[in-house]
Image (tube, grey):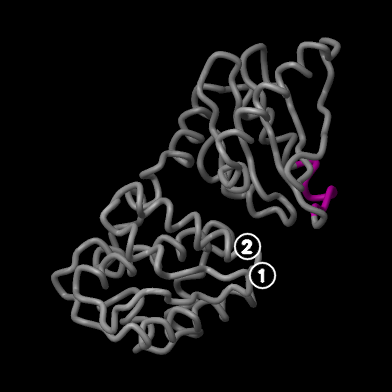
Amino acid sequence: MDKETLDRFLTIPGVTGIALLGRKSRPYFYRSFQELGKRQQDALIQGLFQVLESMPSGFDFFDFQFAQQRVFVYPLNQEWVLLVAADDNLNLSHYDPAIRDLREDLQRDTHRGLAVFRRFTSPQEGLASIPHTPEAAVATDGANLTSVPVPEFLQAVNHLCQVTVGYLGRAVIVNYWKMARDQVLEVDPTAQTLLESFQVERSAEIRYTGSLQHLDPEQHQQVRAWVVMFIKRCEEVIRNFRSLLQTKELSPQEWRLLVKG
């Protein structure tokens, strides 16, 4: 299995998460599974393997409700189990052939599949894998950044939120903002106070709760890294999302402020 295969699978409407669990190996959680707390993840693993012990050999799959999502369980071999989380929008006519192909790929070459999952779920994968385009580079290099009024940044980032809601919906982008922030903080823990002062509301708006009037160049760099990571999350579903933003949805001034100097 390669990255493109997993990419395509994750674009199926209704698929919200995927995980690979080993009896004696570390688990790999992605998307909605990553949003579970550590206790929920541990409970899921423990409960799942207890159930599997009681299942007849050769069973195909089963599903159950967990943490407000439907979870499908597919054994791959004696060691590994594939999990897929879905919501009520799941289209089985698209899902069934796709999961069959994905499962066969993983069974055929589990080691390669593990490498792909490891890449997707690595804490530093997000920033490390951003393409080395000029706009991505500026998010990790503050040399060209200047002091920016917080209200100006806030107006631009909320316009980005409004645009993205039209493509992905409120619940999805709220999760994407939070997941993107966590990934940035894995790489740059010094940004925690600043990024956590930007509250992601359930309405998919971002509200500033701090006292800064301006972002200095270093702070501007940190919030841009968050924006770039959020855009990368969206690109996993909408492949040309960055291009849509730059050429159609955002003004040149907003693009420069949020992504490119």
| Quadrant, the C terminus | bottom left
Instruction: Classify 187 as above or below 137.
Output: above
* Residue that sits furthest to the front in the current view: 211
- Neighbours of disc 1 within 10 Å: few (<14), some (14-19), many (20+): some
Q: Is residue 136 magenta?
A: no
Of 180 and 79, nearer the camera is 180
- Residue found 56% across the figure and 43% down from its top: 34
Q: What's the magenta region?
A: 90-97
Of 220 and 124, nearer the camera is 220
At label 1, the amino acid type is Gly
Q: What kind of element bears circle 2?
A: helix
Q: Is residue 94 magenta?
A: yes
Disc on res. 169: 1
Gap between marks 1 and 2, in whole Å? 6 Å
Whether pointer 1 and pointer 2 mark residues with C-beta atoms closer than 8 Å, the reply is yes
Instruction: Classify 97 as above or below 146.
Output: above
